[in-house]
Image (cartoon, grey):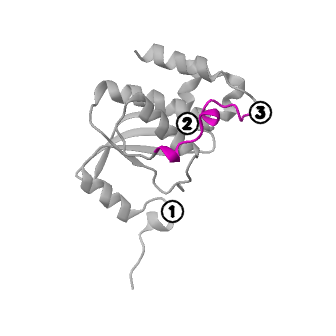
């Protein structure tokens, strides 16, 4: 009888997928979502030990013009896109090689906020294999579907200006 590993029973680690990612020896973009924020990290694995090279949270959007009254929407599709864009610009300055997207145990539903993060990374110039049809529509990325509209263009402009 085989005993399942603790992290697998807690739905935290898919060991088969992790082994495949480690064998590729490419850096990973790890995306995690919490109840309040979206976390994105650029991770390099060395001898099965993960080293976080860069990490960012959607909470950093508050510094770039996201209104504090709308801080509850820092896990939305526009927040995911802008977080991915911000990390992508920082990665593109330091690293020129490609990466693999690591979603962990998050369900991958096309056109979701996870793929909005990927869209932001790709728009920033990070080389990640993807298909265009998994990205959310441009209207959803700009936040036109939200009841409390955000000033998407202003925030995007601030990110691009400050990071150059």
Q: Position of residue 68 (x, y in %)?
A: 68, 23
Q: Is residue 72 left or right of residue 5?
A: right
At x 63% / y 39%, what residue is drawn?
A: 36
On-image quarter of the C terminus: top left
Q: Is residue 115 left or right of residue 78?
A: left
Determine which quarter of the picture holds residue 154: top right
Badge 2 element: helix
Residue at label 3?
Answer: 147
Q: Nearer the viewer, residue 21 or 12?
A: 21
Residue at label 2?
Answer: 80
| Alpha carbons under labels 2 and 1: distance apart | 23 Å
Q: Is residue 139 magenta?
A: yes
Query: Mark 3 or mark 1: which is in front?
Result: 3
| Alpha carbons under labels 3 and 1: distance apart | 33 Å
On-image quarter of the N terminus: bottom left
Badge 3 element: loop
Furthest toward the front, the residue is 133
Whether 124 is drawn above or below 39: the answer is: above
Q: What crowding class fits label 3: few (fewer than 14 Cα within 10 Å), some (14-19), or many (20 or more)?
A: few
Part of the protein shown in magenta: 132-147
Q: Is residue 18 visible?
A: yes
Q: Is residue 84 magenta?
A: no
Q: Nearer the viewer, residue 82 or 61?
A: 82
Q: Nearer the viewer, residue 121 or 58?
A: 121
At x 47% / y 40%, what residue is drawn?
A: 118
Residue at label 1?
Answer: 11
Q: Position of residue 13 (x, y in %)?
A: 43, 60
- Decide: marks 2, 1 in contact (CB < 8 A)? no
| Alpha carbons under labels 2 and 3: distance apart | 17 Å
């Amino acid at each position: 009888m085989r005993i399942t590993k603790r992290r697998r029973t807690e739905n935290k680690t898919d060991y088969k997928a992790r082994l495949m990612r480690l064998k590729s020896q490419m850096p990973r973009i790890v995306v995690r979502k919490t109840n309040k924020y979206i976390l994105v990290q650029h991770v390099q694995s060395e001898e099965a030990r993960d080293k976080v090279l860069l990490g960012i949270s959607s909470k950093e959007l508050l510094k770039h013009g996201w209104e504090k009254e709308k801080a509850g929407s820092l896990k939305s599709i526009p927040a995911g896109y802008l977080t991915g864009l911000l990390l992508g610009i920082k990665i593109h300055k330091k690293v020129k090689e490609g990466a693999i997207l690591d979603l962990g145990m998050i369900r991958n539903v096309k056109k979701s906020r996870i793929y909005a993060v990927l869209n932001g990374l790709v728009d920033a110039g990070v080389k990640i294999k993807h298909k265009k049809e998994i990205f959310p529509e441009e209207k959803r990325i700009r936040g036109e579907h939200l009841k409390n509209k955000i000033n998407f263009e202003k925030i995007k402009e601030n990110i691009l200006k400050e990071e150059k």
